[in-house]
Amino acid sequence: MTAPHDVTAARHDVDLARARWRKSSYSGGANDCVEVAELGEHAAVRDSKDISRGPLRFSTAAMRALVSGIAKGSIDR
């Protein structure tokens, strides 16, 4: 059984054809940021410089845990 924040629990067959990608408002506009798409119970993250590499897919629980950890400072460089 996987934890709700386990990245491996995210489905990899999610259709990204109609994904609405959004870039951080902190992006410098030089295409040097990541983009995120909400996909119902999943989320995808991709490198805006090289979208051909394909996105990373996460469960929404894993995405929340990641963002929360970054905001709390428990995830650093």
Image (cartoon, rainbow, N blue to C red):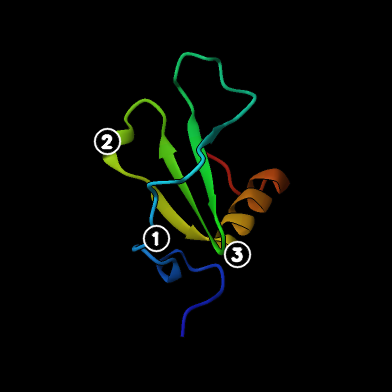
- Whichever of callouts 2 and 3 sits on the residue coming sooner in the sequence is 2
What residue do we see at 36% from left, 25% from top?
49
Camera-near label (3 vs 1) is 1
Q: Secondary structure at mark 3?
A: helix
Q: Secondary structure at mark 2?
A: helix
Kind of residue indicated by mark 3:
Ala
Q: Which residue is mark 2?
A: 52
Q: Which residue is mark 3?
A: 61
> Which of 33/70 is in front?
33
Q: How many marks?
A: 3
Identity of the residue furthest to the bottom in this view: 1
Find residue 14 and name its label.
1
Identity of the residue furthest to the left in this view: 52
Kind of residue indicated by mark 2:
Ser
- Whichever of callouts 1 and 2 sits on the residue coming sooner in the sequence is 1
Q: Secondary structure at mark 1?
A: loop
- Mark 2 crowd level (few <14, some 14–19, many ≥20, 10 Å Cα): few
- Whichever of callouts 3 and 1 sits on the residue coming sooner in the sequence is 1
